[in-house]
Image: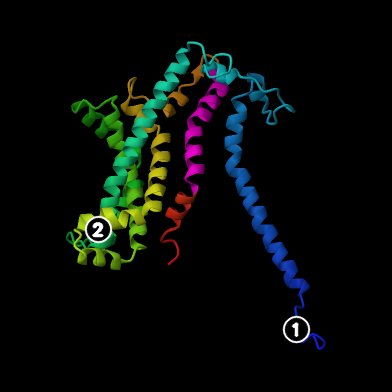
Amino acid sequence: MAISPELDEPVVVRDPMRTARVALYRLLVYGGLIFWAFVSLAPIYWTVSTSFKAAVDVTRGHLIPWVNFQPRWIGWRSLGLSPNTIFEVSTPRAQFISRFENSTIVAIGASLLALVLGACAAYGLSRFRYRFGPMRNTDLLFFFVSQLILPPVVLALPFLVLYKELALLDTHIGLIFVYTLTVLPIVIWIMRDQFNSIPMDLDEAALVDGLSVWGVFYRIILPIALPGLVAAFILSLVLTWNEYFFAALLTATNAKTLPVMVASQTGSQGINWWSMAALSTAAIAPLVVVGIVLERYIVKGLATGAVK
């Protein structure tokens, strides 16, 4: 920076090398983001485009509509969801609606139950000090999170025997219970960081004003922790919506979910890729809409506690 003798004002002297480095840095950053966006969206594009392909287009790997192939409603017609079949009676469409309802009931029910239990457990780990033998709060949190390490197949036989004795096979409530157990550690982990970011002075001030511990939790802390609650709920919803193993193991007809229906799209000639792609597109569409609508809550909730 130099001073102009005529105007007595600072004159900014730009460094060409620094400008070039900044431009190169931005080019690398945005180029990397564009590449990652392409990698992330490519499977979704392939799924959506495959739902409009004929068998020959699928086998030849045609990717660009109206250039490599002519879009058709073959995949959607097989599910009774094409424009010319949507108002007709269709058994596949009835099955899809039934599976969609099952997935909605189970995913929302398990996510809400996990959110209630996980928020209470996370608040306790954040605000109180526990001691169970040699275990402290951090050890308890690690115990909860470590449950994610256990492969689901290890629990297959115990759950199968237990659910048979309790008459919970092929029921919504049975899937809700097992899905709650699978996503509960994630909810506890997210909400514990969320509660840790809230000063304890708020709790103490509310207690002085006459609120009980539960009153502080419900009336003061939970409204502040809303972004974390939404993020934990959406993440739980995605995981339970897409879960296949327990749905295939513990259901037969009444409580079968969409992932099981997607995996069953096979015929005498092999996998019906167009039908599977159409069904997958219809299955992920609600999650995409929810993610777009609640994006700011998800980012804010997951970012809480990342930077101190």
* Depth check, front residue: 263 or 80: 80
Marks 2/1: CA–CA distance: 57 Å
Relative to residue 30, is residue 98 depicted above or below? above
At 48% from the left edge and 52% from the top edge, which residue is drawn?
Answer: 299
Splitting the image into 4 quarters, where does residue 250 fall?
top left
Secondary element type, mark 2: helix
Outermost residue on the right side: it is 6
Relative to residue 95, is residue 20 depicted above or below? below
Secondary element type, mark 1: loop
Q: Which mark is residue 30?
A: none
Q: Quadrant of the N terminus?
A: bottom right
Q: Residue 227 in the image: x percent, y percent?
A: 41, 52
Relative to residue 108, is residue 296 depicted above or below? below
Q: Which mark is residue 216?
A: 2
* Depth check, front residue: 210 or 282: 210
Check if residue 108 falls in the magenta segment: no
Q: Is residue 124 left or right of residue 185?
A: left
Give the amino acid at mark 1: Glu
| Residue named by callout 1 | 9
Q: Residue 278 in the image: x percent, y percent?
A: 54, 25
Q: Residues within 10 Å of mark 2 (few under 14, many from 20)?
A: some
Which circle's residue, 2 or 1, is located before the other in the chain? 1
* Depth check, front residue: 190 or 182: 190
Q: Disc 2, disc 1: CB below 8 Å?
A: no
Looking at the rendering, the stretch of residues picked out in magenta corresponds to: 270-295
Check if residue 285 falls in the magenta segment: yes
Splitting the image into 4 quarters, where does residue 24 fall?
bottom right
Q: Residue 257 in the image: x percent, y percent?
A: 39, 27
